[in-house]
Amino acid sequence: MNKKDWVRFRVSDVFLPTPEELLHVPLADREIEGTIVDFSDSGLKLRAFAVVEVVYGRTMVVPVEKLTLITPASPESEP
């Protein structure tokens, strides 16, 4: 996965903010979508987390392994 890819994930898979902090999302199994804006490492594991901007304007940190790719970014949109 790359920056600007459109992805889907479950609220229960969000690392930050915690799912409990997402009071406006009633169901933990609800899926939401957004665009990858950056990546974060975890110790020696590179790109372990994706920073995802979701459709209603909030940024969430999600383990990359929990993301489902919807639409890949076009090659010319990559930095």
Image (tube, rainbow, N blue to C red):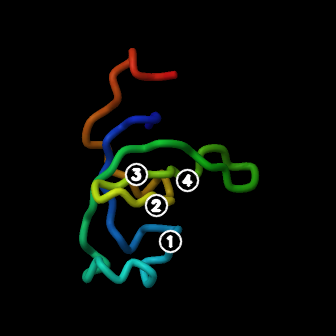
**Please, what secondary structure does the residue beneath circle 1 have?**
loop
Q: Which residue lies at the image location 43% right of the left edge and 44% below the top edge?
A: 36
**Disc ID at residue 5:** none
Q: Which residue lies at the image location 32% right of the left edge and 47% below the top edge?
A: 7
Say which residue label 3 marks: 53
Label 4 neighbour load within 10 Å: few <14, some 14-19, many 20+: many
Question: Is residue 57 toward the left or the right of residue 44 in the image?
Answer: left
Q: Compared with residue 40, is residue 20 higher up or lower down, i.e. above or below? A: below
Q: Which residue lies at the image location 75% right of the left edge and 49% below the top edge?
A: 44
Q: Residue furthest front?
A: 57
Q: Which residue lies at the image location 26% right of the left edge and 36% below the top edge?
A: 71
**Please, what secondary structure does the residue beneath circle 2 have?**
strand
Say which residue label 4 marks: 49
- Sequence-first tag of 1 and 3: 1
How far is mark 1 from mark 3, CA to CA?
12 Å
How far is mark 4 from mark 3, CA to CA?
13 Å
How far is mark 1 from mark 2, CA to CA?
6 Å
CB atoms of marks 1 and 2 within 8 Å: yes
Say which residue label 2 marks: 60
Q: Name the kind of residue labelled 4 in the image.
A: Phe
Q: Name the kind of residue labelled 3 in the image.
A: Glu
Question: Is residue 42 toward the left or the right of residue 11 in the image?
Answer: right
How far is mark 1 from mark 4, CA to CA?
13 Å
Q: Nearer the viewer, residue 17 or 2?
A: 17
Label 2 neighbour load within 10 Å: few <14, some 14-19, many 20+: some
**Disc ID at residue 17:** 1
Image depth: mark 4 or mark 3 in front: 3
Which quadrant of the view contains residue 47? top right
Image depth: mark 1 or mark 4 in front: 1
Please state the horizontal and vertical placement of residue 62, each as a whole percent of the image.
48, 59
